[in-house]
């Protein structure tokens, strides 16, 4: 479901567009299209400013069935990948820390929060709020000749895979001949003052009144109630935003969840170390907590999965840092006063009590966000 850049040859303006070909009969697609159309009708001006715009739809018959195709405005690289293209990190040196400059990170956060506020005001949760779904806009790309945008596609440039083959060696008329990697048009993307960010990919989005059966939120961005109970609420996006605020300002993830059979336990151990003990109502939902905590809730073991019979519990040599300590250790390029403001703001967002988490609109009124002009520079 990766968007492909195309050009509209049927109308007189011949604008570039992007087409997203959906997997045939994949559940949730009807909801994505419904949400995009709802936004276009309910808040057309605001949606155009903060959400990647749906321009048209059509159906495509293929060997694997009928596919719904969504036509969008073309967009640049994601926040996840654009940082690698910034000139200050090219050429790259060993041990160079790659992260957005503070003011750029601040603008990205504010613009993504504005998009989130629009969704929530219309009763919609994004459900997959992460840097990969925050896209930079192009700068006057329609005036760029097509030959300048064309990219090499062959194995020697590592832009395509070797021919796709079945494990049993048999031919498969339904399989693609090869796979192509994403090649964002970073050279045509605006990243200087006044750059624009839009939220994309409503594939995981849902109306507050109709949550999906299974979340698509990245592991490290899940709120504790989602980890423990699978419960949905309108503040799940806000929790993800708080984690991303830490990540974009420091250049490091707050919760790094590697693959393991005990990833939920790992996440909950990191949560308690970073933010403090879980409240009783949440802790009671942690069915495997006795692997790590005594009945008095004192940590005695950090070995994921618990202690095997006949073995001693394992504890880390150094105590895991709190969120504030990890923030300071990452040494973001902020003065002491602003660093203190940001840490308090993150702490305000990452609250275990769902009812105490601020809404996107409330966060936008905070001086730290209100004080930056997304068109370039600070209002302060």
Image (cartoon, grey):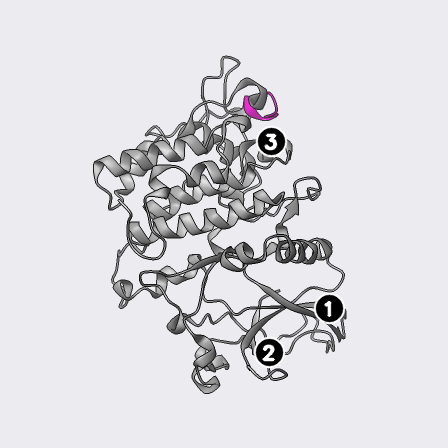
Q: Tag 3's secondary structure?
A: helix
Up the image or down, 250 lies above or below 54; here it is above
Say how many tags the image has. 3
Up the image or down, 133 lies above or below 121; here it is below
Q: Residue drawn at (45%, 21%), measured in percent from left and top?
A: 300
User: Is residue 166 on the magenta stretch?
Assistant: no
Q: Contact (CB < 8 A) between labels 2 and 3?
A: no
Comes first in the chain, label 1 or label 2: 1
Residue under numbered circle 2? 163
What is the quadrant of the C terminus in the image?
A: top left
The span from disc 1 to disc 2 (Cα, nearest Å) is 24 Å
Left or right position of 90 against 44: left
Comes first in the chain, label 3 or label 1: 1
- Nearer the camera: disc 2 or disc 3: 3
Q: Contact (CB < 8 A) between labels 1 and 2?
A: no
User: Is residue 287 on the magenta stretch?
Assistant: yes
Quadrant of res 314: top left
Residue 225 seen in this snapshot: yes
Residue 302 seen in this snapshot: no
Residue under numbered circle 1? 67
The x and y percentages for residue 100 are 32, 54
Q: Residue drawn at (63%, 43%), measured in percent from left and top?
A: 123
**Nearer to me, 85 or 293:** 85
Tag of residue 80: none
Comes first in the chain, label 2 or label 3: 2
- The 10 Å Cα crowd at callout 3, few under 14, some 14 to 19, many 20 or more, is some
Point out the stretch of residues depicted in magenta: 284-290
Tag of residue 228: 3
């Amino acid at each position: 479901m990766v968007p492909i850049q195309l050009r509209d040859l049927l109308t007189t303006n011949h604008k570039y567009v992007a087409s997203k070909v959906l997997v045939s009969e994949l559940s949730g697609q009807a909801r994505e299209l419904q949400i995009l159309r709802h936004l276009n009708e309910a808040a057309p001006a605001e949606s155009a400013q903060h959400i990647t715009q749906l321009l048209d739809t059509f159906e495509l018959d293929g060997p694997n069935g009928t596919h719904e195709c969504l036509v969008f405005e073309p967009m640049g690289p994601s926040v996840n990948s654009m940082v690698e293209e910034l000139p200050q990190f090219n050429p790259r040196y060993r041990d160079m820390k790659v992260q957005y400059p503070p003011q750029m990170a601040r603008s990205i956060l504010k613009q993504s929060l504005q998009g989130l506020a629009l969704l929530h005001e219309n009763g919609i949760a994004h459900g997959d709020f992460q840097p990969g779904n925050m896209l930079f806009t192009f700068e006057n790309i329609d005036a760029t000749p097509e030959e300048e945008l064309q990219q090499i596609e062959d194995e020697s440039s590592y832009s395509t895979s070797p021919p796709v083959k079945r494990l049993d060696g048999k031919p498969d008329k339904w399989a693609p001949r090869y796979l192509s990697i994403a090649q964002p048009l970073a050279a045509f993307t605006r990243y200087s003052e006044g750059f624009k960010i839009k939220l994309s990919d409503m594939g995981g989005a849902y109306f507050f009144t109709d949550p999906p059966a299974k979340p698509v939120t990245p592991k490290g961005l899940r709120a504790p109630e989602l980890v423990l109970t699978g419960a949905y609420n309108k503040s799940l996006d806000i929790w993800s935003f708080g984690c991303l605020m830490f990540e974009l300002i420091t250049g490091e993830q707050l919760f790094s969840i590697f693959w393991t059979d005990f990833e939920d336990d790992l996440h909950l151990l990191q949560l308690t170390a970073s933010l403090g003990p879980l409240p009783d109502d949440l802790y009671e939902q942690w069915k495997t907590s006795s692997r790590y905590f005594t009945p008095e809730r004192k940590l005695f073991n950090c070995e994921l999965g618990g202690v095997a019979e006949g073995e001693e519990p394992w504890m880390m040599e150094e105590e895991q840092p709190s969120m504030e300590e990890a923030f300071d250790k990452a040494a973001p390029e902020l003065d002491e006063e602003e660093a203190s403001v940001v840490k308090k703001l993150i702490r305000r967002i990452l609250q275990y009590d769902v009812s105490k988490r601020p809404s996107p609109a409330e966060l936008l009124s905070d001086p730290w966000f209100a004080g930056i002009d997304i068109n370039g520079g600070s209002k302060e």
